[in-house]
Amino acid sequence: MRGHERVLKILLGCGDVDSNKPGIFGQTPPYFAILEGHEGAAELLHGRDKVSPDKPDDNRQTPLSCAASEGQGRVVKTLPGCDDVSPEKPDRLSKALLHCAAENGHDGVMEILLGRDNIDPEKPSKFGETPLCWAARNGHEGIVKIILGRDDVNPDKPDRSGRTPLCCAAENGHEGVVKTLLGREDVNPNKPDEDGQTPLWLAAKSGCEGVAKILLGRDDVNPEKPSESGEAPLCCAARHGHEGVVKILLGRNDVNPFKRQRRNGETVAAKRRWR
């Protein structure tokens, strides 16, 4: 589909043309028109009786979810107003339109979708991830700010593994997102996931020095809070060879490099010796 609307009008004028007939992978003409951002062609096809712009392909991806993933804002703005289009219809990974836009960092699409009354900004995916979790994990600071602008969004809501948006951002080294989330009073900087891993612990594990500095710059962050296995952030950073994070942690007067770990009684010095 190349968006040739004049040719499309001629073809649609033929009585025996099935404008909803799927291709080899189950993709219909509306699918291609919406995916490629041809809003004129999409409107022509949608104007036909029995044409579904919300029909999924063989991978259970709808045209609209693909448009949201690709940032086709003008098409997304046009079609969700139709009664037969579900903006929250999940794709094969149980991600709705908001998840697709958040994951891929499409600010314009996100603003359009959040402007609708029938979209839940906190609806989780199959694995419990909210749109905010997706945006935080992938470092889309603009999307994070847009979502946090809503009064009905909990910025500390975890996914099924107990990971909050702050945990997701910290683990992946997204300093801007971490700063934005920490700017909220209702975000707990010490909140661990189900394995007891705090944002600082995850940053230490990944070697994210910038995030570690931001977190340790706060008085309410516990630099020695261990995970469920009993390993403190300093021991974790040392085990993974993250020298920069180790130096940052040792810069705190309240961090004991000789504190024994609950799991096996090893100190940080022992970890270094046996690497």
Image (cartoon, rainbow, N blue to C red):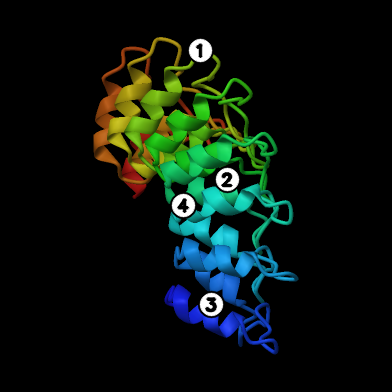
Secondary element at image label 1: loop
Amino acid type at circle 2 is Leu
Tag 2 residue: 98
**Is residue 157 or residue 263 the one in the foreground?**
157
Q: CA distance from mark 4 to mark 3?
A: 21 Å
Would you say residue 223 is visible in this rendering?
no
Amino acid, disc 1: Glu
Amino acid type at image mark 3: Lys
* Residue indicated by mark 1: 185
Which one is earlier in the sequence, the residue at label 1 or at label 4? 4
Residue located at (63% from left, 65% from top): 46
Q: Nearer the viewer, mark 1 or mark 3?
A: 3
From the viewer's perspective, is residue 223 above or below residue 57? above
Asked if the residue under mark 3 is in contact with the one under mark 4, i.e. CB atoms within 8 Å, the reply is: no
Residue under circle 4?
74
Visible in this render: residue 73? yes
